[in-house]
């Protein structure tokens, strides 16, 4: 039942802290999008990793997109589209 | 002297690698493109205290060796020693940010797997100390099994121990390197996770004190990225920047103009009238001069762009604009280059190098000429003065101003529409995600800014001295030969090749209301947009300074052209690719003739269609 845990990163509110439980490109797919494995690797490369803590820092001015996230010592910005590939548990 | 060691600088984006490179090599560096791609190849040379010579190459910043973009491919191929133009490095200097150890260690681990000698530069130690982060350097060196040196890129001090290390350890290091690594393979999702775990373990082991977050960055971001205040600050920054580009550049542009006029006078004085004088004065000096005059704007614009980039604000601007730009398939990074194109498309196109995604970059380059550059102003001013009556639309707002603004708006709207269409057709492909790091704010180092501006200015000047100079000579020949027959009463250009081409093209331009005079003026006007004003002056046999021509020309045109022709000519200039410098910049930045050709064809098609519609509508309405 590993697939069921966690909520999408995009559902967090401003300032909220959470722990990454799963990174899966599948959930952010769609026509013309990156394939799931590629998206997963890119998210891992920028520094997302299961078990790590993150915090929502800022939302973009229009449609609350993109999202700026504190990730360890760095700040990373993602579009909501890509943020859907990250599942978290608030903590 | 021994042969020079080859040293490659590798690191994540934002690790301070380029600042370290600038500190090592100073002005002894060369910037060019790698053959076949528009990735900057930065090489330089330095000598250590013991006399060892190093040829350093600054490889493009990369998060991994997967080669997701042309830049990252270069980094990977050089590290693997399989790049065609760059010899395999003797030693790789991995630059890592001491304040973000874990993230940066992953690339080190990946690079080390390739089996080449590695030295790690633990960079930004000053920032780490100010944030109370303490790292056990010896332990890190032991864990990794390679030398680790503390550096502070912006200061020479930290470099000394790096240099010592390099010159004493290097020969030993290279000799001990016997490991034959397995053939390189792209890392699977699984091995990325493994390397993540390993980096995390090492980072935890060597971090003595965790330190705090970068308070200053957080506090600034709370204001700068605020959903309401943030965009306002961005507007103010941009307003100030463009104000500076136009008003600060005014004086130096005047000096350049005066200098060129002075040179022209001197040549007129010293050379006998004739072909040589005409070629130098009317062909080369006035033509190349009309391009060189934009140098002050380019220098000011790039000073701002580099400051914004180096301080970390540029990425924030991209963050704020991303959603808006995303609607036409671009991303936040396209915003500044497009805005710069209001001054001149050439620096705008050069500024697209900050866009990582090649497709978005190409789309941005292709629509940049649609932004109304300052060279269009003389043309717009002339035609508006001649054909648009200046009665008030509402009190205080004249019709002339409204038309001028309409021309700007038309440019922006068409750029957005064209970008949207290109994304669905020509530059179609996978939608690239926006995944970007927002680096901590930094005080830009003067050295980096000066070097950067100097490199851009040199590229611009070199182009003015080569492609544009050549084109000016060709245009001059076209407009001068053959000479008018004795007793000719029409202006000389009428009898020239340019005149003949104009006449030949006349039937083609008739449907959009252009007479042969316009067709002829369009040919020298290819050099730069505002040259068309001088060319029209020549066709209507006027002479004098640009201002005098402008004033008397407006009167002449009022009687010579119909209103629909005047309007069609205005609309033509919204789209027409009447600028060789832009075409040349596109050629250089896309490294092919395909895209400048495509740009030329689509712009001229748009110009023709829009002028046709304008002429027909205005004719039937009038």
Image: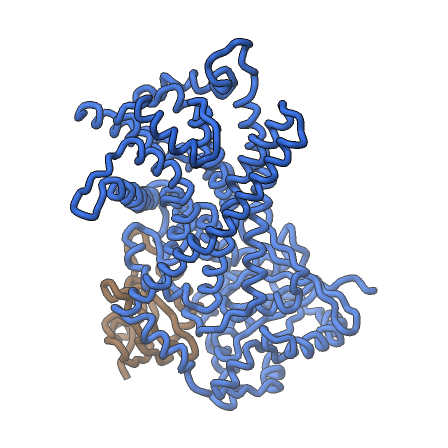
The spot of residue B432 in percent (x, y) is 37, 55
Horizontally, is B244 left or right of B38 in the view? Answer: left
Furthest residue to the bottom?
B208
Looking at this view, is B423 or B400 the one in front? B400
Label the blue chain with its letter: B
Q: Can residue B592 be spotted in the picture?
A: yes
Question: Residue at position x 57%, y 24% from top?
Answer: B477
Where residue B458 sits in the image (x, y, percent)? Answer: 59, 50
Residue at the outermost right position: B1
Residue B369 placement: quadrant: top left
Closer to us: B297 or A56: B297
**How many discs mark residues in the rendered view?**
0
Instruction: Give the quadrant of the N terminus of chain A.
Output: bottom left
Q: Left of B430 or right of it: where is B409? A: left
Image quadrant in which you'd find residue A4: bottom left
Whether residue B176 is visible here, answered yes or no, is no
């Amino acid at each position: 039942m590993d697939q069921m845990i966690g909520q999408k990163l995009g559902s967090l509110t401003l300032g909220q802290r959470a722990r990454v439980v799963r990174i899966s490109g599948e959930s952010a797919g769609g026509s013309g999008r990156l394939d799931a494995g590629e998206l997963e690797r890119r998210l891992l490369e920028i520094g997302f990793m299961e078990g790590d803590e993150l915090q929502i820092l800022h939302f973009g001015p229009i449609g609350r997109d993109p999202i700026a996230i504190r990730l360890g010592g760095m700040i990373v910005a993602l579009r909501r589209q890509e943020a859907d590939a990250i599942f978290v548990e608030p903590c | 002297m021994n042969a020079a060691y080859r040293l490659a600088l590798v690191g994540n984006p934002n690790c301070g690698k380029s600042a370290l490179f600038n500190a090592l090599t100073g002005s002894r560096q060369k910037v060019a493109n790698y053959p076949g791609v528009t990735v900057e190849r930065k090489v330089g040379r330095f000598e250590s205290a013991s006399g060892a010579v190093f040829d350093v190459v600054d490889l493009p910043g990369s998060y991994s060796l997967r080669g997701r973009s042309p830049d990252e491919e270069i980094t990977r191929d050089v590290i693997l020693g399989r790049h065609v133009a760059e010899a395999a490095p003797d030693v790789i200097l991995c630059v890592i940010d001491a304040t973000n150890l874990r993230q940066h260690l992953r690339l080190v681990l990946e690079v080390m797997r390739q089996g080449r000698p590695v030295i790690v530069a633990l960079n930004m130690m000053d920032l780490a100390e100010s944030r109370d982060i303490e790292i056990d350097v010896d332990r890190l060196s032991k864990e990794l099994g390679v030398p680790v040196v503390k550096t502070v890129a912006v200061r020479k001090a930290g470099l000394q121990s790096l240099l010592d290390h390099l010159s004493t350890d290097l020969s030993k290091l290279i000799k001990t390197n016997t490991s034959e690594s397995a053939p390189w393979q792209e890392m699977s999702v699984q091995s990325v996770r493994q390397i993540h775990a390993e980096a995390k373990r090492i980072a935890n082991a060597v971090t003595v004190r965790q330190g705090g977050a970068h308070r200053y960055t957080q506090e600034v971001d709370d204001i700068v990225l605020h959903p309401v205040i943030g965009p306002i600050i961005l507007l103010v920054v941009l307003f100030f920047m463009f104000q500076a580009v136009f008003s600060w550049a005014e004086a130096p542009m005047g000096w350049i103009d005066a200098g060129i006029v002075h040179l022209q006078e001197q040549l007129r004085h010293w050379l006998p009238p004739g072909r040589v004088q005409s070629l130098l004065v009317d062909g080369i000096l006035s033509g190349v001069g009309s391009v060189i005059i934009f140098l002050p704007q380019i220098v000011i614009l790039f000073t701002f762009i580099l400051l914004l980039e180096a301080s970390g604000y540029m990425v924030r601007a991209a963050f704020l604009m991303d959603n808006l730009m995303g609607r036409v398939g671009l991303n936040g990074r396209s915003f500044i280059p497009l805005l710069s194109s209001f001054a001149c498309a050439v620096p705008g196109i050069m500024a697209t190098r900050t866009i990582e995604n090649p497709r978005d970059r190409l789309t941005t380059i292709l629509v940049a000429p649609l932004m109304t550059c300052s060279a269009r102003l003389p043309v717009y001013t002339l035609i508006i003065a001649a054909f648009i009556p200046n009665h008030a639309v509402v009190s205080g707002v004249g019709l002339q101003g409204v038309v001028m603004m309409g021309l700007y708006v038309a440019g922006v709207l068409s750029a957005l529409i064209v970008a949207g269409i290109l994304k669905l057709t020509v530059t179609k492909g996978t939608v690239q995600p926006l995944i970007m790091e927002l680096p901590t704010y930094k005080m830009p180092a003067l050295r980096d800014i000066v070097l950067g501006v100097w490199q851009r200015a040199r590229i611009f000047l070199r182009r003015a001295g080569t492609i544009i100079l050549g084109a000016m000579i060709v245009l001059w020949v076209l407009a001068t030969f053959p000479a008018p027959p004795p007793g000719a009463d029409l202006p000389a250009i009428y009898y020239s090749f340019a005149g003949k081409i104009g006449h030949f093209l006349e039937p083609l331009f008739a449907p959009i209301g252009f007479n042969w005079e316009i067709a002829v003026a369009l040919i020298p006007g290819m050099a730069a947009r505002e040259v068309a004003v001088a060319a029209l002056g020549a066709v209507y046999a006027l002479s004098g300074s640009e201002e005098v021509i402008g004033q008397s020309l407006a009167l002449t045109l009022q009687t010579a052209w119909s209103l629909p022709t005047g309007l069609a000519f205005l609309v033509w200039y919204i789209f027409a690719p009447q600028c060789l410098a832009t075409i040349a910049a596109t050629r250089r930045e896309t490294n092919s003739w395909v895209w400048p050709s495509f740009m030329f064809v689509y712009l001229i098609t748009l110009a023709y269609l829009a002028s046709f519609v304008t002429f027909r509508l205005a004719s039937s309405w009038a």
